[in-house]
Amino acid sequence: MAAMCSIIGYVGEKNLGQVLLDGLSRMEYRGYDSAGISGLKDGKFVLLKRLGRVKNLADAVDSSMNLGNVGIGHTRWATHGKVSVRNAHPQISCNGIFSIVHNGVIENYESIKKYLVKQGYKFSSDTDTEVLVNLIEYHYNKEREPKNKFLTSVQKALLHVVGTYGIAVLSKDNPDEIVVARKSSPLLIGVGDGEMFVASDACAIVTHTKNVVYLNDGELARITRSDIFITTMKNKEVNAIKCELDWQTEDVSLKGYEHFMLKEICEQPQSLENAMRGRFSDDMSTSKFGGLQLSPHELRQIDRILFCACGTAWHACLVAEYFIEKYARIPVEVEYSSEFRYRNMPLEKNTLVFIVSQSGETLDSLAALQEAKRKGYKTLAITNVVGSTIARESEGGIYQHSGPEIGVAASKTFTAQICIAAMLALYFGRLHDMSFDEGAAFVQALLQLPEKVAQVLEKKDEIRLIAEKYAHYEDMLFLGRQSMFPIALEGALKLKEISYIHAEGYPAAEMKHGLIALVSEKCPCLFLATQKDILGKTVSNIREVKARNARVVAIVSEEDATSFGYIDDVIAIPDVHDAIRPIVATIPLQLFAYYIAKIRGCDIDKPRNLAKSVTVE
Ligand code: G6P
C-alpha cells in the first residue's frame, strides 16, 4: 500500500530516467521511504528501486542508461507492508505484462488476492498494489476484444476495487501508452509538444510544461505522446480540458536559500499580497471574492459558520473564529476534519461550512467536505492548490495564491489562510453591522500587512541569536491569549515538527490549571504579549513562570518593548491593527523554530515521519 506518495510518468523523446528522477525529487517534500522507476525498452520492463531518498535511486541510474521512451516512477510511504525494495513501486504483474505505480489504499485486496492465488497468480510483495496489477493482468488475459484491450482491462479491474487510488500503468504490449486512473488521489496530465507527463503534483512537471489536464475522480485516461483519451468508469467519453498552471519555475527552486522553509517564510510579504490582490471593493471599505457562488443575500442568511481542517490549517481556522465572531458577530465553530466526519454534529439550517486545506487533498478534510455536502450544507473551500480535489468538490471557495509550498511544515500558506480569514470577517462584518469607516480602516490595515511582515523579517539575525539560546532545551511552552492562542499553538507545532523539541501551546491563563507543573528552569516559555487590552493579564502569567525559574522569551509590541526589561529575551514587532496582528506575530515564531532546527542539524524541509499532504485516515 502506498498512501502519501508521488507518481510521475512520461512518454516522449527526452531522457526518460532524468525526467522521472527530476519529477520525483521535486515531490520529495511529500514524504516517502522508498523510490522506484520503470521504463519499457525493447518489449521489457527496466525496473530500478531503492530504499530511502530519491538520490539513492539516482545513484543507481547511469545518465547514459537508455530506459526507453515511456516510463513511470513513484515514491512510497509505507502503510501496510514494511519498507522494503520488494514492496516499493513500480510493481510488475505476475507474467510481466504490466508495470504499475499506485497512490492510495485498496481496501478489499485480501479477498481479490485469494481469488487470484486460486487462479494461479504468484505474489512477490505484501502490497495491495501488486494485487491490483495482477487483477489487471487477469482481465487482460480474459479480454477477447483486441481494441482498447489495455484500457478496458484496467477499467474492469478497478470496477472490483474498494478503496482509493491514483495509478499509472505501463503495458509491454502497448509500448507507446500510459493508462492512468484516479479515485480520491490526485493525478494530472502535463501536455507538452510531442510528449506527455503524468504527475500527482503539478510541481513535478512545471519545469517542462504549464499546460495541464486534471483528471476527475472516476476517470481513466490513455495517454500517448500526442493524444489523451479520457473516459469514465461507466464508459462515457470525457473532453480533456486544458488549464494553465500559474506557477513559475522558480517557485520550485531554492533561489539561493538554504532551505525551502526559509525561502517560504521570506516570501510572505509577496504571498500575502497575492492573497489580497483584486479582493477589495472599489470604495476600499470591504473585501470581495469571485468564487463564493453565493449572493450577498444568501450570505446574510448564514447564522453559523463551521470550519473544518487539519494541522496548521486548523490553527488558521481558530484565528478565523476570533475574527468572524469579533467583527461579524456570527457564531463560528472549528472542528478537526477527522472528528467532524464521524461526529454527526447537529448544525443549524443556515450553516456555512468552510473546508480549509493548503493542499486540497487531505483525506480527512475531503471526507469532512463530503459529509457536510451529504447533509445538504453549503460548502466552500479555502485552498492553495488550484484544481485540487477539495477545490473541485466544494461548491465554491477562495484560492490562497501562495504559490507552491515545498517545505513540509506550512509557513506562508498559514499566514495566507489567516489573511483570507481576516478578509472574510471584514466581508461578513460589512454585510452586518460594521460601518463604512471601520471597514475602510480594516482595509488600510490589511494593505499594510506585507510591509509590516517585511519589517519583522528584517529581524532574522536577531531572532537567530535568540534561537541559539533555546536550541538545547527539550521542552518548551508557548502561551497567548485570545487570537494569540492559536498562534501559540502554531508556534509550538512548528517547533515540534522541524526541531523535534517537545512543545505545547496553551491559552496563557489556562496554564495555571495543569501545565504550570511542567514549568522549571528546564522548560522555557514563549509568550505572545502583544495585545494592549489584556497586556496586564499576560504580564501576570509571565511573572508566574519567571517565579518558577523558567527562561522567558516574549513577542511584544514595539511600543511596549521597554517595559519588558525583566524578561530574558524580547522580540518586538510593529504595533498593528488587531486584524493583522496574528500574522505579524507568527513570523518570529516561524523563524525561531527554523533557526533552532538548523542549529540542531535537523532535516528542515523533510522532517521525519511527516508528509506534506496526508491522504490516509
Ligand atoms: C500535514 C502537513 C501539515 C498540514 C496538514 C494539513 O500534516 O504536514 O503541515 O497543516 O497536513 O494539510 P492541508 O493540506 O489540508 O492544509
Image (cartoon, helix red, strand yellow):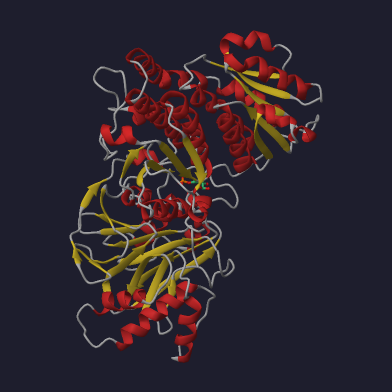
Give the percent coordinates (x, y) of residue 555: 61, 21
Residue 141 point in image, percent of width and height: 32, 87
Q: Nearer the viewer, residue 601 or 404?
A: 404
Q: Is residue 23 above or below residue 382?
A: below
Identify which residue, 90 or 329, lies in the foreground. 329
Q: Position of residue 51 (x, y in %)?
A: 56, 63
Q: Is residue 220 left or right of residue 356?
A: left
Q: Nearer the viewer, residue 244 or 481?
A: 481
Q: Describe residue 338's horizontal placement relative to residue 214 as left or right.
A: right
On the question of residue 186 being in view, the answer is yes
Q: Residue at x 60, y 41 (%)?
A: 498
Q: Quadrant of residue 557?
A: top right
- Tell me if residue 40 comes above or below residue 440 in the rendering: below
**Number of marks present in the image shown:** 0
Relative to 366, residue 449 above or below: above
Residue 158: x, y in percent? Answer: 35, 74
Q: Foreground residue, 135 or 477?
A: 477
**Image point 43% across, 27% down: which residue?**
329
Residue 277 placement: quadrant: top left
Q: Is residue 258 visible?
A: no
Kindly identify the residue that appears in the image at 30 percent across and 47 percent down: 395
